Structures are given as structure tokens and as C-alpha cells.
Image: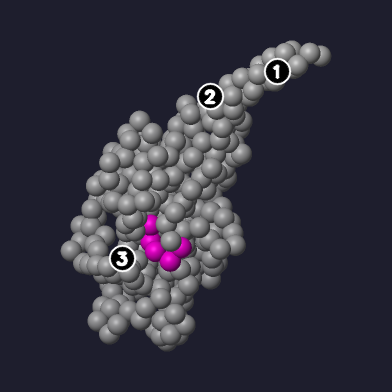
Amino acid sequence: MSSLLKHLVITVFLLVIATIAPVLAQEKITVYPVNYPLAYFAERIGGAHVDVVFPAPPDIDPAFWVPDRKTIGDYQKADLIVLNGAGYAKWTKKASLPMLRSVNTAQAFLDNLIQIQTETTHSHGPTGEHSHAGTAFTTWLDFSQAAQQAEAIYLALAKKLPDYQKKLKENFQELENDLLNLDRQLLDLSALKPRIPLYGSHPIYQYLVRRYGVNMKMVMWEPDEDPGDQHWRELDLIQTEHPSSWMIWEDEPLQASIDRLAEMGIRSLVFSPCFNRPEKEDFLAVMKQNIKNLRAVYELEK
């Protein structure tokens, strides 16, 4: 082969590589969600075709976290921004996020969101004082709504990755089946003894209460803090109107809180909303454990 022909072959080869390289680079898109449940949904649906980045620190509630300027810039540059809606992650209302690359996963049930009326404020560690007034935002604790949020992610990804729609749909349907199975389990469980009175340690269970008919009175306690004398006195008053043998916590509480509740005849169990990525398990495993924990209420209560 002459040197001229070799040079021509090499030139054509380099041109071909230069042409297809951008296409190959675009096969995997970057997805930035605002909480871990949405990150899990995106990972399950997108599979190998997505790079899901959830940058919130593991020790901060993402609902009240405010990212720094660089992280907001990373969100702005993402191929897809996955929003929870329902007033979740208030920083997203102040940042200039590209609407055409954002999906509000609560859009399908906007008319069914729960409004909360409260003037009480408290703090979550370094995030400072805040209130839970406004719209209840733990939408995914109604697993039928979680399935709708997953569908919104699927539809958004299908537009971004049209060549992989079949696989995306298969992945979504598997996830949807898992979520609706959780939904059926809780519906069946709560139907056994639907009016068992419960306490919720934090005002985050509104959609769980509504969907599954849970008879819950929610207070404003943190699992890693002593509630304080005033909250203990308030619980004494609540017991006269709403006597319960169970406190549902969002995370493992202090042993001192468990012991003091036990002295009042109140058992403790965890039903985690799974805001942040778990250290060892995933969203589905955590929700299965939540249901297993809650099953104790219906098996032990008369």
C-alpha cells in the first residue's frame, strides 16, 4: 500500500471516529434528582443508559438542604432534572433551572396534594429552623403515587433516549410492579384492623395515612434528639384523646426515648421515608422492611 493510500485510509478512519464519537458519548445521559427515592426510580428505569447523581449530604434532609452555587450549576447542566413537586426542595424555586430539561414527578396528581396548616417550627441540625406548613411532600409514601412518579421519569427518559424505549419500558414496568405490590401489601395490612391508633414522631406520613386509612396522630419529634419536657407533657395530653401503644419513627430513635415511651406503655418502630441513600440497602429493601416493622402493630394489637 502506498504512503498516499495509507494516509487516505487513516484520514477516513479518523473522520469516521470523529463522527460517531459524539453519538457514543450521548448514549449515557446525566440525571440529577432532588431526593433518593427519585434517584432510585431513575436508576431502575434508566439502567446502564443513565448516570444518576444525587449530591445531597447523607446527614441532611434533602427537603430542606440548600446546595452551593457549584452544585446548582451541576443541576443546571444535567440532561434531566428530576423534581419531586409538592413544594419539595424549596431551593429549586429560587434557582434558574431549565424547564425543558426538568420533570415534575407529582404533575399527575397535583389536584390530590395535601395541604398542612401549622405554625410550629423546628430544626434539622445544620439546616436551621423551618416549618412543615404548606404542601405535604413525602408523596411516595403512597405507593400508588410513587408509581406515577416513576412513570413520569420513564416518559422523560424515553424522550431523551428514544433508541432505548423498549428497555426503558421494561425496566419501568418491573419497578411499577414492585411499587404496586408494596401498595397492595399495605392496603391488605391496614384493612385487618383499620382504626388502630398510632403516633407518628414527625409530620411526614400524611400520604401514608390517607392512602392506607392509618389512624395516626403526628407530633414534632426528632429521632436523634430528646423531645424535651414540653413535648413529653404534650404527649401525655394526646394520650387522653388518642391513646396508642405505638410510636412510628422516621429513623432509629435514641434508646432513652424508646425506654421512656416503654414506661408509658408505648412501643417504638421505624417506618423510614428513605429521603437519603441508605448505607447498605436500596429503596425497595427499606420499604419492605418498613412494612415488616408495621406488621407487628397489626399482629400484636387486639
Q: Residues under labels 2 and 1: Cα distance?
A: 37 Å
Disc 3 on helix, strand or loop? helix
Instruction: Decide if residue 275 is in sight here.
Output: no
The segment highlighted magenta reads 58-62
Give the residue at the far front of this rendering.
Answer: 3
Q: Amino acid at mark 1?
A: His
Disc 1 on helix, strand or loop? helix
Sort mark 2 into few (<14), some (14-19) or many (20+) by Cα contacts within 10 Å: few
- Residue 32: % across, % down: 44, 44
Sort mark 1 into few (<14), some (14-19) or many (20+) by Cα contacts within 10 Å: few
- Residue 62: % across, % down: 38, 57
Main SS, magenta region, reads loop
Q: Amino acid at mark 2?
A: Pro
Instruction: Decide if residue 271 is in sight here.
Output: yes
Residue at 23% x, 53% y is 134
Write down the residue under mark 3.
127
Q: Are marks 2 and 3 in contact (CB under 8 Å)?
A: no
Residue 246 placement: quadrant: bottom left
Q: Nearer the viewer, mark 1 or mark 3?
A: 1
Residue at 30% x, 82% y is 228
Write down the residue under mark 1.
7
Give the residue at the far right of this rendering.
Answer: 1
Sort mark 3 into few (<14), some (14-19) or many (20+) by Cα contacts within 10 Å: some
Answer left or right for 144 relative to 87: right
Residue at 44% x, 36% y is 79
Q: Residues under labels 2 and 3: Cα distance?
A: 40 Å
Write down the residue under mark 2.
162
Nearest to the observer: residue 19 or residue 299: 19
Give the residue at the far left of this rendering.
Answer: 119
